[in-house]
Amino acid sequence: IVSYASLLCIFLSVIVIFYIIELCYLNGNNVVQENEVNLLELVWTVIPTLLVAVLCVFNLSFIYFDSEIESDAVVKVM
């Protein structure tokens, strides 16, 4: 449970830091490259998607198996 909480906090902190940096340095600038690398764009999309999916699974397993609150039926909303 401690590793899940620390992983979630680190993940959210890194996302917020990158967003703040983007707002500071790229405000009003549109960066459009003529020769974009399709593989990079795919990896840039797939890796965060997989990380969010893993965190959702951890969250659901914590709620269903490790939570001290009694739950008869868990509704999974994604």
Image (cartoon, helix red, strand yellow):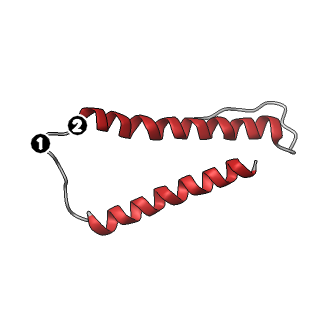
Task: Tell me: 67 left or right of 3.
Answer: right
**Dot 1 and dot 2 residues touching (CB under 8 Å):** no
Q: Position of residue 11 (x, y in %)?
A: 55, 52
| The furthest residue to the left | 34
**Residue on which the image places disc 1:** 34
Badge 2, how many Cα within 10 Å: few under 14, some, many 20+? few
Compared to residue 4, the image places residue 17 above or below, namely below
Q: Residue at x 14, y 39 (%)?
A: 35
Q: Position of residue 71 (x, y in %)?
A: 84, 36
Q: Position of residue 7 (x, y in %)?
A: 62, 51
Asked which quadrant contains residue 30, the reply is: bottom left
Mark drawn on residue 37: 2
Q: Secondary structure at mark 1?
A: loop
Kindly identify the amino acid type of the residue bearing the numbered disc 2: Val
Q: Quadrant of the C terminus?
A: top right
Q: Residue at x 40, y 60 (%)?
A: 19
Q: Residue at x 79, y 30 (%)?
A: 73
Please name which of the two marks, 1 or 2, marks the residue nearer to the observer.
2
Q: Residue at x 47, y 37 (%)?
A: 49
Q: Give the Cα distance between marks 1 and 2.
A: 10 Å
Mark drawn on residue 19: none
| The furthest residue to the bottom | 24
